[in-house]
């Protein structure tokens, strides 16, 4: 029996789909589709993501997703007995797992432009507020007397004055 990746690749090729078309229709990344077809399960963070991608890809190709998932479990070595009906099976849940699950459905191509527009609007508001405050402020306040005040005479600040007048008779003798 062919591996899960081979089955996916053969079904895609028989339907005449290219990898970019699959990427566009499934919203998966190109390297994820290539990993699924090559059977490289190591690029996926957890088996639950691998199962989800295989189910999504199989649905697009109109394959029996449950049969593929069973074959995937065998390939991953995770074939487990049927789960308890009472729901006592432990769940792996933590903060990171919850955040990953929460943000996995976000359409980042729509969110990032909205985030940038909001950031620019908030930045524009604060820039306009700063500019209004800057324009209404007296920029010369606290400068001091400066050069326009009359100088205060002091003996230590004066230099001797030399003139070009001819010396007087008293000075010549």
Image (cartoon, rainbow, N blue to C red):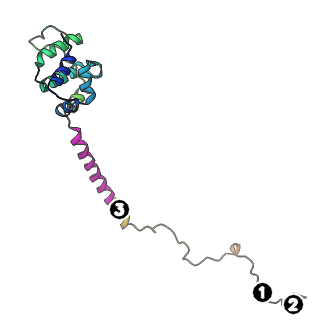
Q: Position of residue 38 (x, y in %)?
A: 26, 19
Q: Residues within 10 Å of mark 1 (few under 14, many from 20)?
A: few
Image quadrant holding the C terminus, namely bottom right
- What residue is drawn where x is 78% and y is 89%? 165
Give the mark nearer the N terminus: 1 vs 3. 3
Q: Secondary structure at mark 2?
A: helix
- Vertical side of 31 occupied by 1: above or below: above
Q: Nearer the viewer, mark 1 or mark 2?
A: 1
Q: Give the magenta range.
A: 103-128
| Residue 115 covered by magenta stretch | yes
Q: Position of residue 128 (x, y in %)?
A: 31, 60
Q: Which residue is mark 3?
A: 131
Q: CA distance from mark 1 to mark 3?
A: 57 Å
Image quadrant holding the N terminus, namely top left
Q: Secondary structure at mark 1?
A: loop
Q: CA distance from mark 2 to mark 3?
A: 70 Å
Q: Position of residue 164 (x, y in %)?
A: 78, 86
Give the mark nearer the N terminus: 1 vs 2. 1
Q: Nearer the viewer, residue 157 or 24?
A: 24
| Residue 105 covered by magenta stretch | yes
- What residue is drawn where x is 25% and y is 18%? 39
Q: Which residue is mark 2?
A: 170
Q: Which residue is mark 1?
A: 164
Q: Secondary structure at mark 3?
A: helix
> Could you tell me how many numbered marks the image carries?
3
Q: Residues within 10 Å of mark 3 (few under 14, many from 20)?
A: few
């Amino acid at each position: 029996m062919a591996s899960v990746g081979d089955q996916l690749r053969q079904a895609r090729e028989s339907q005449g789909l290219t990898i970019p078309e699959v990427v566009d229709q499934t919203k998966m990344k190109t390297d994820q589709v290539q990993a699924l077809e090559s059977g490289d399960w190591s690029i996926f963070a957890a088996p639950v993501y691998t199962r989800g991608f295989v189910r999504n890809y199989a649905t697009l190709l109109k394959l029996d997703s449950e049969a593929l998932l069973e074959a995937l479990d065998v390939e991953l070595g995770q074939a487990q007995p049927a789960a308890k009906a009472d729901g006592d099976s432990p769940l792996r849940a933590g903060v990171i797992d919850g955040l990953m699950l929460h943000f996995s459905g976000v359409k980042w191509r729509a969110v990032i432009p909205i985030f940038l527009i909001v950031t620019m609007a908030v930045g524009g508001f604060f820039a306009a507020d700063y500019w209004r405050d800057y324009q209404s402020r007296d920029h010369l306040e606290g400068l001091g007397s400066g050069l326009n005040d009359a100088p205060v005479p002091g003996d230590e600040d004066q230099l001797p004055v030399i003139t070009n007048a001819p010396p007087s008779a008293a000075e010549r003798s």
